[in-house]
Amino acid sequence: MSYLSQCMDEFFTSSKTLAYSTENHVRKFVAYIEGLGGTKADSLKSIVREDVEECVGYYHRRGSICSVNSLDNHLNALKSFYTFLDKNYKGDNIFHLIKDWNVFRQTMIDRYNLIEARPKDYLLNEDICNLLEYFNSQPDEYPALAIFCKLMLVAPAKRTVLANLSRENFSFDYREMRVNGVDIELPIALSRSITHEMRRSKPLETTSSIFAQIVGSEKFKGETFNNQLYYALQKSGYAVPEGKHSFAVEAIRISAILNLFSQNVNLYAISKVASITVQGVWNLVEKYAGDIAKAKISQQIQDGVCQCSYYEFL
């Protein structure tokens, strides 16, 4: 274990009320520094502001820091960490050497083209990744919601459809799921999570919903997930709207549909699993990702023509 990791562990144990987002971003920074090799992780004085900038760039390329909100979360977490190091005589606070904080921050916003404002009706991929990281690190916090969100990302069906999935919608080992007449193969980790939760819960008499069973309530309703998602997003570092205590899971569904489109999945296939018309899918794409849709038309036609058997004769 590096000296930086030891300091990180002490920082975590020094505060019982440390937010998950703060821990997550500090862990990312420490992992990045250790990944560089050399002596930086054991000689804190060798870590400089440029390392912070490059760390942001590293996670930007990995899709974890793509917005200004995520950048601020990352920087605020590191400021708290370095305040602890300085206060406990473990290392100098490198942020004290930054003369103009706004310039420092804006440099990274411009350099990595970070998104200033978040969309209102769907989640960015970085927000989804942060949410999934939170679910995976806190498996007992929202077990039903975590499984629900992951299933929605795999198969963006309507909330009411997914919330009412029963044991009969899955294969015996939960490796496959049938939704809206489509058989979907599930990731191994997800199938294991479902298996684990189903084994430690008891079947209910009046409902066959796997989520009602996992929650352990005959009165379970899918609307419950909107409230839970609000707090899960907040804990993951997402800037949730003030004055509200609900965040529609529909945002995850729209994100999943847009991502399937960006991966060139057939519009009919998307409409089938999402249970909306092809025109409905296209309307979502034009509304939320019009630039992407228009940019992909010519390329898709070109790629499609090249795959035709007669192309070599043209």
Image (cartoon, rainbow, N blue to C red):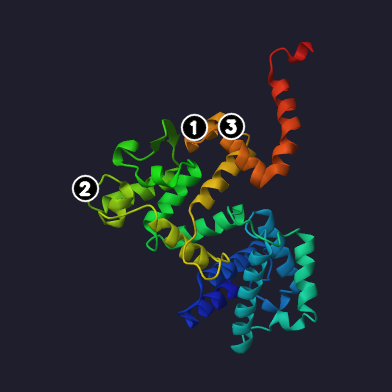
Q: Residue at x 55, y 70 (%)?
A: 242
Q: Tag 1 or tag 2, which sits nearer the N-term?
A: 2
Image quarter (top left, top right, bottom left or bottom right) of the C terminus: top right
Residue 1 visible in rendering = no
Image quarter (top left, top right, bottom left or bottom right) of the N terminus: bottom right
**Residue density around tag 1, few if under 14, some if 14–19, many if 20 or more, within 10 Å:** some
What amino acid is at disc 2? Answer: Thr
Q: Which residue is mark 1?
A: 272
What amino acid is at disc 3? Answer: Leu
Q: Tag 3 or tag 2, which sits nearer the N-term?
A: 2
**How many angstroms separate mark 1 from mark 3 (CA)?**
9 Å
**Quarter assignment of residue 98:** bottom right
Residue 293 picture location, percent across and down: 69, 38
Q: Residue at x 37, y 47 (%)?
A: 163
Residue 131 picture location, percent across and down: 52, 58
**How many angstroms separate mark 2 from mark 3 (CA)?**
37 Å
Q: Residue 206: which disc?
A: 2
**Residue density around tag 3, few if under 14, some if 14–19, many if 20 or more, within 10 Å:** some
**Quarter assignment of residue 289:** top right
Q: Which residue is mark 3?
A: 267
In front here: 180 or 196?
A: 180
